[in-house]
Image (cartoon, rainbow, N blue to C red):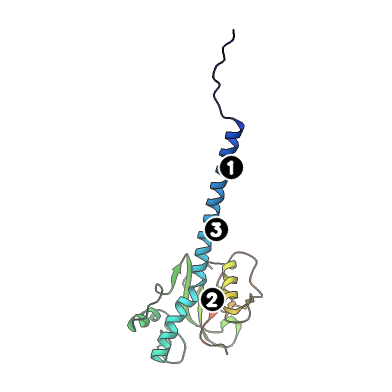
Amino acid sequence: MRSFREEKGFTLIELAIVIVIIGILLGLVLRGSDLIQGAKNKKIRAIPGKWEVPIWTYYDREGVFPGDTTGDGLIDTPANVPTDLDTDSIAHPPASPASIEGVITEIESVALVCGSAVTRNAMLIGGGVAPAVATLDVKVAKRIDEDIDGTVDGQKGRVRYCGIDGKTIEAAWPPSGNVTATYLFDKIP
């Protein structure tokens, strides 16, 4: 008579259950990383408001912008922006140029802004004089443009695509890559 040995191994159903569980876990991990990236992008999109509110609060109190040492309405000394805000006990993000989620932000007056003949106060989100490269993903820049201007148009409104220094005339937002968004926060002429 033949004796049966106990066979060891996994059945097809057990393997299928394990594969389904692994798939669910991978889906959760990928979804979690999407949520984390979305939160980072939301934090970046909030940069203009985080700086604009304290700057306008200072303007309302003092009658000039922080960093405007000549009283002409232009931020001619960007390094004084956080110092002036601190002097008036106005909370603000880390000192400019600051990095939020790896995105550099610089606040200053820009001569010949976006190829025009005027000098304006601008927030260069993702670039400026201090960094040598643009650090803002163009998809996030377009969302900032849409959030503030209501439309994605890098040549009109308060958010524009004007090169890393805020001076170059650019045709349109590029399809991909890193850029600098020029946010004109004083007044639109």
**Label 3 CA crowd tier, 10 Å (few <14, some 14–19, many 20+):** few
- Residue beneath label 2, please? 165
**Label 1 CA crowd tier, 10 Å (few <14, some 14–19, many 20+):** few
Query: Earlier along the polypeptide chain: callout 2 or callout 1?
Result: 1
**Label 2 CA crowd tier, 10 Å (few <14, some 14–19, many 20+):** many
In the image, which disc is placed on residue 158?
none
CA gap, disc 2 and disc 3: 31 Å
For the point 55% across and 43% down, which residue is it? 22
Circles 2 and 1 in contact, beta carbons < 8 Å: no
* Residue 65 locus on image (x, y percent): 43, 87
Q: Which amino acid type corresponds to the residue marked 2 in the rendered image?
A: Asp
Q: Secondary structure at mark 2?
A: loop
- Residue beneath label 1, please? 20
Circles 3 and 1 in contact, beta carbons < 8 Å: no
Residue extending furthest top?
A: 1
Circles 2 and 3 in contact, beta carbons < 8 Å: no
| Closest to the observer, 147 or 128 | 147
In which image quadrant can residue 75 be found?
bottom left
CA gap, disc 2 and disc 1: 51 Å
CA gap, disc 3 and disc 1: 21 Å
Q: Which amino acid type corresponds to the residue marked 3 in the rendered image?
A: Asp
For the point 59% across and 88% down, which residue is it? 117
The mark closer to the camera, 2 or 1, is 1
